[in-house]
Image: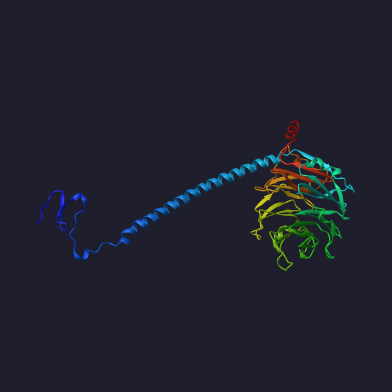
Amino acid sequence: MPQELPGLYWDEEKQRYFPLASSRRPQAVGPSTLHPPTKPQSLAAPQATGESHNLKRHRTRSLLRAREDARFSFRTAHKNKLMHQISCFQVAQTSHVASSSILSLTRCAITAFQAVSYNNNVHSFAGDTGGWFYSSVIGRDEPVTGYHTSHGWRPEFSLSSEISSICISGSRCIATSFGPESKILHFPLDLDSEDIRVARVNNRSVRDIWTADFQGSRLVLGTNDQAVVIDDAADRATVRFMKTGSDVFAVAQDDNIIYTGSRAGIVQRFDNRIASTKGDRILSDPRTTQHNSVTNLKIFYDWQLLTSNIDGSLAMFDLRFPGNRTPVISFTGNINTYTTKTPIAVDPHEQFLFAAGQDRRIRLWSLHTGGAPLVSPASVFQKPFEDPIRALQVVEEQEGVLGLWATSGAALYKYNLGQRMEEESEAMQC
C-alpha cells in the first residue's frame, strides 16, 4: 500500500507519484458510471449560447439602425417642410410680371394657351374666341417674354368657332373648337415630318367640345352629355362614347382610367379596357353636388384627384377610397358663382396650386397644406385683371425657375415666380 505524501498522489496504473497540481486525482467509480458523457451533450449548450448571443446582437443592431433611420427621416421631413415654407413665402411675394399682346386677326380674347420645350425651342400656342389658332417658336436660350410680342406670333388656322382647349403630348399639339360643328386641329411640332390637318368626330351626336385631355396617343374630349375617347388621335382608328347624362366640363386620364366632371356636379370613372360605356359615380354626394358643376379635374401623386366646382370650391380627394366623400385637403378663399371657364394650374413639381377666380384675380395655395390662399401685400396676385382670366399654365424654364403664364382679354402675361421688381432692377444694373 503506497504511503500518502503531501502534495502528491499515487497513480496505480503507472506505479508512481504525480503532483496534485498537474492533474485531478482520479475518483473511484463503479461499473455503472464508466460511460463518459457524449460529445453532443457537452457541445449543445455552448452552441445554443452562441446563437442566442448572435441573435441578440442582430436585434440590437437592427434597433439602433431603425432609430437612426427614424432620426434621419424626421430630419429630412423637417428640412423638406422648412424648404417648402420658404418657397411658399418667395412665390407669394412675386411682384414681377411682364405683358405682351398677340396680333389677333379678329382682335378677340385669348381663350386657350400652352407652351412646351421641344428640340431646344420653346413652342407656344394660343387660340381666341374668333376661332384662330396661333403659334410661336423661340430658341430656348432666348428671353421668352421679350419675344412674345405681336410680331412673334403666326396665325396658323381658323376653326371658325371659339378655341375651347389646347393640349400637347409628345411632338403633337391638339386644339379643339366649341360649337355645333366642333373641330379638332392636329398641329405637329415638327412641321417637316407631318402636315397640319383638321378633323371632326363622325357622329352627329357630338358637338360643343368643352375641354380635352391628350396623353400619349389617346385624346379624351368633354362634349355634350358624354365623353369621347379617341385611342389613337393620329388615325382615329377607335372612337368610343362614354355616356354621362350631362355636359362634360372636365376630363382627366390615368393610364386606362378616365375621369369626367359634369355640369350636373358629378364625377364619374370609366375603365377604357372594358366594353361598358357606363361609368362609376365617385366622390360625390347627391344632396350637395346638384347644380354645383365640376369645372376642373387634375390627378396628382398617382392617387389624388383635385376638383374645382362652379361655386369656387377646390378640394383634393383620395382615389384609393372613391366612396369617401370627405376631401383630404380643402383650398378655401376662391371666388366663383356661375363661370364655367375658371382655369387652374399646378407647377411641374406639384408644390403649388393657382386658380383664377370670377373676380378676375389669381390666387395661390400650397398643395401640401391647403387652407387659405398664400398672400403678400407686395404681390401682384393682389391686383385684379380688367378682363376674365381664361388660361393658366406653369412652366419650368430652367432648373428650379418657374414661370406662370396667364391670358386675360387679348393680352398674355408672364409671372416670374418668386422674383420681385427690385431683384430684377439689381440684376439689370449689374
- Side of 225 where 107 appears, left or right: right
- Taking depth in this image into account, of 239 and 306 the one nearest to the observer is 239
Q: Nearer the viewer, residue 360 or 98?
A: 98
Which residue does the image show at 47% across and 48% down from the upper left? 64
Residue 127: x %, y % from top left:
84, 51
- Residue at the top extreme of this rendering: 429
Q: Quadrant of the N terminus?
A: bottom left
326 vs 319, nearest the viewer: 319
Q: Quadrant of the C terminus?
A: top right
Position of residue 76 relative to residue 264, above or below, is above
Instruction: Look at 76% across and 44% down and name the residue there.
Output: 140
Q: Name which residue lies at 34% across and 57% down.
A: 45
Question: Could you tell me how many numbered marks the image carries?
Answer: 0
On screen, residue 57 versus residue 399, left or right, reads left
Q: Quadrant of residue 257?
A: bottom right
Vertical comparison of 111 with 28: above or below: above
Percent coordinates x, y for residue 46 in the rendering: 34, 56
Most extreme residue toward the right is 106
Task: Please state the horizontal and vertical placement of residue 180, each as a whole percent of the image.
Answer: 86, 60
Q: Position of residue 100 (x, y in %)?
A: 83, 42
